Amino acid sequence: MRLTILLAFCFTIIFTSCSPYQKVYKGDDVGAKFVFADSLYQLGKYKKALKLMEQIVPAYRGKPQAERLMFIYANTFYKMEDYYLAGYQFERFEVSYPTSDSVEVAGYKSAKSYSELSPRFSLDQRDTDKALEKLQEYVNKYPNGEYRIEANALVAELRDKLEKKDIKVAQQYLRISDYKPAIAAFDNFISDHPGSKYRKDAFYGRFDAAYQLAINSIPQLVQERLVSAKNYYQSFVKYYKKDAELMKDAEDILTDINKRLNIAEPTS
């Protein structure tokens, strides 16, 4: 009853004056701060609510009300788009309240917070890796969970970002004529991303890089490297011979390889 009256009182004074907030904020009544903070939170006044919560979080540790407080505390950071702190606080909530009715949403929002921190593909992807780890944890823990569709969509989006970064790195090596690292990078891509939509580009890029390496080598190495490039051609056509555009380019390269090999072969 006391809680209901206090909650109603808080809703009233929020709309009528700023001074009651200041009184509660500067006062020592921890219970009043909790109720006022909760009221502000429900009204979407997250900055003011957060200031009060920051004062009382230590005082509520171990108390029954702490579960509610710690969840809205984490969610306030989330609502304010402070995703570093949101992710961290939701993680703490999961550990502290593993049987809570809110633990599943906390797990998802923790992972979602890290996904929000994931930068564009050309930058460092540590936050992307963290987000994928957290999302996979959520999917594994809640295979039929409320947010499984959203989580799987985020996983696909983030994996695509990592794949795009890796393929661009390999293509950049090829573009700057650094052929050996290009071949290695395309090899790694093929191994690391077996279901990627960029896999075709990796197979073709590896073949092209091997060909470029061969024709730019010292004479003693040309033939051996042309044969190696031809093997990469076979790997490419094994999977992508129906790709008309790339097959035309690949066959043009193969024609030149065969011509060079015939020239390089000794006559009897």
Image (cartoon, grey):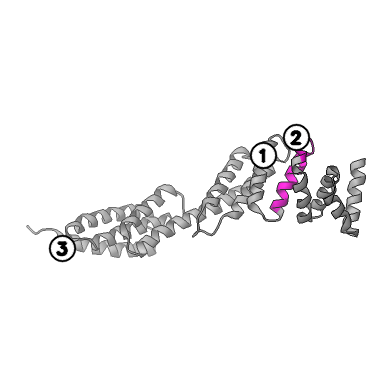
Residue found at x 70% / y 47%: 74
**224 over 29 or under it: above or below:** below
First in sequence, mark 1 or 3: give its number: 1
Residue found at x 50% / y 58%: 123
- Which picture quadrant has residue 253? bottom left
Q: Is residue 237 visible?
A: no
Residue found at x 76% / y 54%: 46
Residue type at tag 2: Gly
- How many residues crowd mark 1 within 10 Å: few (<14), some (14–19), many (20+)? some
- How many residues crowd mark 3 within 10 Å: few (<14), some (14–19), many (20+)? few
Residue found at x 74% / y 48%: 54
Most common secondary structure along the magenta stretch: helix
Q: Nearer the viewer, mark 1 or mark 2?
A: 2
Numbered label attached to residue 62: 2
First in sequence, mark 1 or 2: give its number: 2
Q: Nearer the viewer, residue 183 or 61?
A: 61
- Which picture quadrant has residue 89? top right
Numbered label attached to residue 263: 3
Q: Nearer the viewer, mark 2 or mark 3?
A: 2
Q: With 198 as the anchor, is 257 left or right in this view?
A: left
Residue placed under numbered mark 1 in the picture? 94
Numbered label attached to residue 106: none
Residue type at tag 3: Ile
Badge 2 element: loop
Q: With 64 as the anchor, is 23 left or right in this view?
A: right
What separation in Å lies between label 1 and label 2 (alpha carbons)? Answer: 15 Å
Q: Is residue 12 magenta?
A: no
Q: What range of the chain is rendered magenta? A: 59-78
Task: Residue 132 in the image: state x and y as whole percent.
Answer: 55, 47
Task: Residue 3 in the image: state x and y as whole percent.
Answer: 89, 42
Q: Is residue 54 visible?
A: yes
- How many residues crowd mark 2 within 10 Å: few (<14), some (14–19), many (20+)? few
